[in-house]
Image (spheres, rainbow, N blue to C red):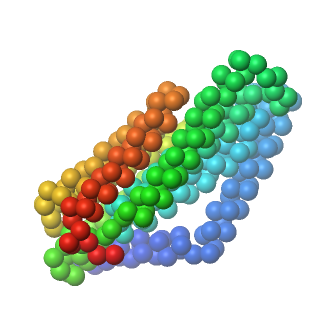
Amino acid sequence: MEKFLQSWIAVYDKCEERWHSIQASKLTSNLVVLFFLIGIIITLLSHYKLIEYQVGKFFAIELAFSILLISEILGLVFILTHSVADSVGKQFEIISLILLRDAFKEMGHLPLDVKWSTETLLELLPLMTDALGAVFIFLIIGLFYKAQRHVRITNSPQEQLRFIMLKKSVANVLLMVFISICIYDVIEFFLTNHYQNAFNIYYTILIFTDILILIISLRYSNLYIHLFRYSSFALATVIIRLSLSAPKYYNVLLSVSAGLFVLLVANIYNMLNKNEITK
């Protein structure tokens, strides 16, 4: 059993090493460019009614952003094992990019030669709220990272190693699930000409993952201050998940509210726990 666990962790470590390599960054960049060009071709074919699949004018940008977001979500798996707070920050980075993508999507509904009127200005409201929401979250992320302090909840290096190994085991399963969903989405898109937005599924899985890591952490510390912090971060993930399926305006309200919530929790945690905080 111990040998299997070591092999299982070694797979994760190898994947993490590859993910942070220059080759992986180049591959991600190439895939984004490739899908951007594919999006342009699909847009042209749709415009001239050569295919049945109807897309907006900025579909290529939306598709490229989607590939970029998928890579960001995969990267989230490798942050999960290092810091729960960093993982939460990464989730808000992803939400800000989703809002920017949605802003481009709203722009695609407008004609290239806009005839300005009251109706046109009203149509711009969803676009502007998504864009401004992304900026507010961008600011919150910066403040959250500055406020972040790391406190070790384990009592010995051996406990810390076991805790990390447990988190890596969870992250390994999460990585396999995410890759399976990505492959399924790409195959489904090319077979049915229908793009399935799977970010709701990703965040639903993340909710349960956050709760699982919270439960695992109780093995090493059941102090109220640590329990409240981890539980608050898990709640923020739930709010983010709700924002993905919320109507326009409410999605931005929920996302920004979740960001302010974790920022407030982080600052209160630092204030109450300042004697134990180590950079």
Q: Please say if 165 is above or below 44.
A: below
Mark yes or no: residue 26 visible: yes
Total of numbered circles in the picture? 0
- In the image, what residue occupies the spot 13% across and 60% down? 222
Q: Quadrant of residue 31?
A: bottom right
177 lies left or right of 275: right
Q: Please say if 156 is above or below 238.
A: below
Q: Position of residue 219 (x, y in %)?
A: 15, 64
- In the image, what residue occupies the spot 72% across and 22% down? 120
Residue at the bottom extreme? 157
On-image quarter of the C terminus: bottom left
- In the image, what residue occupies the spot 45% across and 35% down? 253
Q: Please say if 170 is above or below 42.
A: below
- In the image, what residue occupies the spot 39% across and 76% down? 10
Q: Please say if 48 is above or below 1.
A: above
162 lies left or right of 90: left
Q: Position of residue 230 (x, y in %)?
A: 26, 55
Relative depth, front residue between 277 and 2: 277
Q: Position of residue 201 (x, y in %)?
A: 44, 42
53 lies left or right of 217: right
Q: Position of residue 206 (x, y in %)?
A: 37, 50
Residue at the front extreme? 271
On-image quarter of the N terminus: bottom left
Mark yes or no: residue 185 visible: no
